[in-house]
Amino acid sequence: MMGEARAKQLADRIQVLVAELLERRVKDPRLGFVTVTDARLTGDLREASVFYTVYGDEQARANTAAALESSKGLIRSEVGKALGLRHSPSVAFFLDAVPENAGQIEELLEKARMADAEVAKAAAGAKPAGDADPYKRPHDEDDDEQD
C-alpha cells in the first residue's frame, strides 16, 4: 500500500513538473497549446505515463506529439533531478481523449433530452389503457366467505 501512495504522490508531482517544463523550458515551435491532464507512475517508479490534451486541429495534435517525443530526454532528466530518485523514470506521452469523449457524451445527452421532451409531449393528454385503478385490493371478509 505504501508503494501505491508514494507512486501516486510522485505522479502528481510529475504532472506539475512536466506542465512547468513544457511552459518554460521546451522551446519547440511545434509544441501547441498543451494541457497536462494526468500522470501515472508504475509501482516500481520506473515508467511515467503523462496524459495531455492539445487545443486545435489534427495538425496541431500531430505537431505537439512530435515536439513531446523529441523533448522526452530533457523532460526525463529534469523530472529525475527534481524528484531525486535513484533512477529517472522513463516518460511516455499519451493524448488524453477525455475532451473528445465529453463532447460526444454532451451530444448524446442532448439527444436524450429531446427524446424525453417528445415522450412528455405525447404523454401530456394520455389516459390509462385499463381501469383507472389497476391494482388489486384485498377482499373484504364477507367476499371470502362466499367463495
Image (cartoon, rainbow, N blue to C red):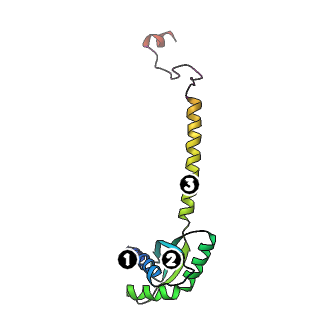
Q: Earlier in the sequence, mark 3 or mark 1?
A: 1
Q: Residue at x 63, y 73 (%)?
A: 59
Q: Secondary structure at mark 1?
A: helix
Q: Nearer the viewer, residue 34 or 40?
A: 34
Estimate the x, y position of residue 45 in percent, counting from the top left. 44, 82
Quadrant in which residue 141 is drawn:
top left
Q: Residue at x 57, y 32 (%)?
A: 121
Give the overall secondary structure of the magenta segment: loop
Which residue bears the numbered disc 2?
A: 49
Q: Secondary structure at mark 2?
A: strand
Q: Nearer the viewer, residue 137 or 140?
A: 137
Q: Amino acid at mark 1?
A: Arg
Which residue bears the numbered disc 3?
A: 105
Q: Amino acid at mark 2?
A: Ser
Q: Which residues are magenta?
A: 124-140
Which residue bears the numbered disc 1?
A: 6
Camera-side mark, 3 or 1? 3
> Would you place residue 79 above or below residue 15 in this image?
below
Q: Secondary structure at mark 3?
A: helix
Give the distance between the C-alpha atoms of the residues marked 3 and 1, in whole angstroms.
Answer: 34 Å
Q: Earlier in the sequence, mark 3 or mark 2?
A: 2
Q: Earlier in the sequence, mark 2 or mark 1?
A: 1
Give the distance between the C-alpha atoms of the residues marked 3 and 2, in whole angstroms.
Answer: 25 Å
Q: Amino acid at mark 3?
A: Ile
